[in-house]
Image (cartoon, grey):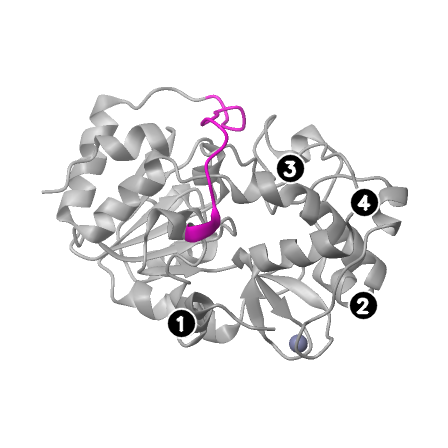
Amino acid sequence: MRVPSVLKACQGRPTILGHRGCCSSHSVSTSPPTLAFVPACQPPDPTEVQKLQEFVSRSRRLFVLTGAGISTESGIPDYRSERVGLYARTDRRPVQHVEFLRSARARQKYWARNFVGWPQFSSHQPNVAHWTLQRWERLGKIHWLVTQNVDALHAKAGNQRLTELHGCTHRVLCLGCGDRTPRHALQERFQALNPTWRAEALGVAPDGDVFLTDEEVLRFHVPPCGKCGGALKPDVTFFGDTVSKQKVDFVYERLAESDSVLVVYSAYKFALAARDRKQPIAIVNIGPTRADPFAALKLSSRCGELLPLIALK
Ligand SMILES: [Zn+2]
């Protein structure tokens, strides 16, 4: 399979550096912003905003962690939020890594759902919180940004000092030869192989998954790798899999170079490492997090409402 030059350029770098906007060229916003998947919360408290302002102003090399919460304001549901998360609303659970590897049927099911959900999922756009963090990077405030999200929204916003800890659904990985290709190219192959297949998406999950009947799944054809014939997998870390040591070490190095940590809905183990390094931590998260007890500052507000209030000086 021919690989577009933009992806080759990405592959030339370590994957830990993110993919620098690979996804930005093939997505069009079709849906208005929605807050349907954002937990209820109070508006930002002016006193707390001022404290966060001082926290950010003091930092010269800010390390930022983001998780699913930042994307809920772009209309992507998370798994765990009370009442509005996928776990709370449905009994569906994401695919497990081992199941995906050993079962062709599981892969067929995954890709059939993903095929249906892709047009909507890939059309999601960065929200004001993503744009704010992109601006902070451009102005030199952010030393490194680490996200657990696989939705490419930070890359779409243009962040480059970025590690997508769990990969990105906008890339496809061959389990046989390790070839990486753009997800949108696979969509074209799906369409060519399944010209009459139709199914109705019943709701999109955080990784672009949707829900289909067994009959619909059985009729769906999945192409192999164009290079080696191997099985294809989204270039993401599924539940039950682990992030590579190389990538984790890279993140710890960027963390060590930073002088403070802003946690936006995410990543306990890195917050823990920051605590051990005695780096000040600020957390923006609706509801409690495990890192709250050792954070210098905790704000329970919507990040899209809060972050734009912070001025860079
Ligand atoms: Zn291959």
Chain-order first, disc 4 or disc 3: 4
Q: Residues within 10 Å of mark 2 (few under 14, many from 20)?
A: few
Which quadrant holds residue 46?
A: top left
Which amino acid type is shown beneath numbered disc 2?
Answer: Arg
Residue 242 in the image: state x and y as whole percent.
Answer: 59, 66
> What residue would you read off at disc 1?
9
In magenta stretch: residue 38: yes
Which amino acid type is shown beneath numbered disc 3?
Answer: Val
Label 2 and label 4: CA atoms lie apart by 28 Å
Chain-order first, disc 3 or disc 2: 2
Question: Count the marks: how many?
Answer: 4
The span shown in magenta is 25-40
> What residue would you read off at disc 3?
204
Which amino acid type is shown beneath numbered disc 1?
Answer: Ala
Point out the frontmost of discs 2 and 4.
4
Label 3 and label 2: CA atoms lie apart by 25 Å
Horizontally, is 108 left or right of 215 in the view? left
What residue is drawn where x is 41% and y is 63%? 18
